[in-house]
Amino acid sequence: MDLLAAVDWHVIWQRIFHPDHVFARALWTTVYIAVLAQLLGILLGLIAALFRMSRIWPLKFLSAAYVLVFRGTPVIVQIFFVYYGANLLFGFTLIPNSLDFGLFQLGGAAIAGILALGINEGAYMREIIRAGIDAIDKGQMEAARSLGMTYRLAMRRIVLPQAARVIVPPLGNEFNNMLKTTSLLFFIGVYELFGDADVHYSTTFQPVEFFLAVSFWYLMLTTGWTLIQAQIEKRLAVSERGDELSFRERVAEAWQPMGAWARGAR
Amino acid sequence: MTADGLVLHAEDVHKRFGRLEVLRGISLDVRRGEVVVVIGPSGSGKSTFLRCINHLEKIDGGRIEVNGHLIGYRERDGKLVEDSEKNIARQRAEIGMVFQRFNLFPHMTALENVVEAPIRVRRTPAPQARRQGEALLERVGLDDKRDVYPGKLSGGQQQRVAIARALAMNPALMLFDEPTSALDPETIGEVLDVMKGLALDFKTTMIVVTHEMGFAREVGDRVVMMDEGRIIEEGTPEHFFREPREARTKQFLSKILV
């Protein structure tokens, strides 16, 4: 086994089972950036999807242009553009040097990264959300409007909650991608999982050990998410079978493993 | 309601889908407490006419008034312009509609379906809306199903919830768009019974598009026969059973009265 002889298994073991404090911060950075960017993406995607369906043509146009630009250019370019270019372009401090939320601080690079990834993600989420809304029977909107609901109210109370169920599976895939795409942010100086591995590699010249170990951690994140997603989908499917739980209870239950996990971690 | 008791006043209503003229001048008056049954072959424009009454479809000509209020349009300098979304929604709240395919909200229980519009549109306090909703579900015979999701209900039960949902807004006029044609034969009766109850016990003003001539005979005040976008014959149910005038009507009735 000459092939593996040079591998320092101890280093890999250490990285996986005894991660240091700096690593823990990098892991946390990856997670919160992915979550915040995804949330931003969902919000922007929802707005763009509603604009797309609007009768007002400038909104339609805006939505189309948004998707065209952000799906048609590399995300790494968008990241660099936002981080290095946004403040110059707008002539004021759009991206501050840091933000203090008490619980944790966000550096300028992280802010730019979340914005860039979120805006990019929104372009993909628009299509997913629109497909989800299109999947809901037109009769639902008609029934809602026949009861005197305005378009907005009917959307919010009747169509979107149902569309959410259709949206969850593709949304899960998007978040899986997002967890991995955050690694690009190292190129603007965000110290996240990949960055941590790269820093160790460049000081030790042990690429196999550190990149193997970091791959393990990415796998942990993505598989962990897959399990959570499966739970969410399972719970959301409950009402299709007609079980007697309210929608709110179902969402609470879908997230219950998360709560249990968080309690266990504490 | 207007002084003359007119709930619906439709005058020379025209509607086209592209080149196809679906309604070619429909005029119909419905008085308070009246039950009008609309029959006619498919494609005759019955459903479209019903959907025009609550402005789910825009009309291309004529006018529709419910309780003396012009539906979907405002008069400005003698011309009709489409009304604001808020006003149209307010008018729709006064008109109940029951659909062929029920269109219950599948993510809400039976009771939630019924109380949704009173709470969100009318701003009825939730406890009061729930009490009224429970009473309505009892009226349609489903008080034991209030916490059940539509997916667990039979077609007939779903349609009865849909009727309760429409009634919850206390509408001046109820529109039924082929309410039993998507149902299994065994459950048609339970829905018709509820509708008969509305007509006989509550004097609900209703327009019913249906081929259930038994229903028409029992509770219908008037039957309207539509064909190719026009009303071709109008009269009491008895008239239609005994001596329909038009050949088209006779031919149509011979097919549905087997």
Image (cartoon, coloured by chain):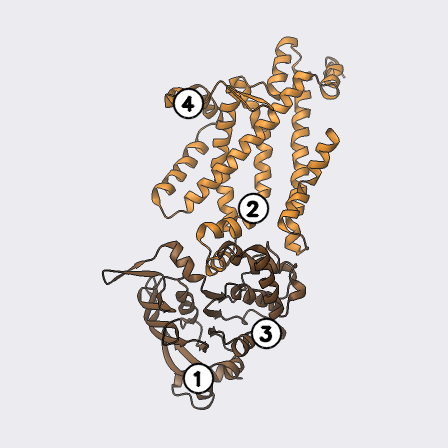
Chain colours: A orange, B brown
Q: Secondary structure at mark 3?
A: helix
Q: Amino acid at mark 1?
A: Gln
Q: Residues within 10 Å of mark 1 (few under 14, many from 20)?
A: few
Q: Which residue is mark 1?
A: B251
Amino acid type at mark 4: Ala
Q: Position of residue B95 (x, y in %)?
A: 45, 65
Question: Farthest residue toward the left?
Answer: B77
Question: Mark 3 falls within which chain?
Answer: B
Label number found at residue A61: none
Are dots 4 and 1 on a single chain? no
Residue B100 picture location, percent across and down = 52, 67
Q: Is residue B56 visible?
A: no
For disc 4, the marked residue is A86
Q: Nearer the viewer, residue A264 or B23?
A: A264
Between marks 3 and 2, how big is the CA–CA gap? 34 Å
Q: Is residue A229 left or right of residue B219?
A: right
Mark number displayed over residue A164: 2
Element carrying mark 1: helix
Residue B254 seen in the figure: yes
- According to the image, label 3 marks what residue? B188
Labels 4, 1: front one: 4
Q: Residues within 10 Å of mark 3 (few under 14, many from 20)?
A: some
Label 2 to label 4: alpha-carbon separation: 33 Å
Compare residues B158 and A77 and report the one nearer the observer. Answer: B158
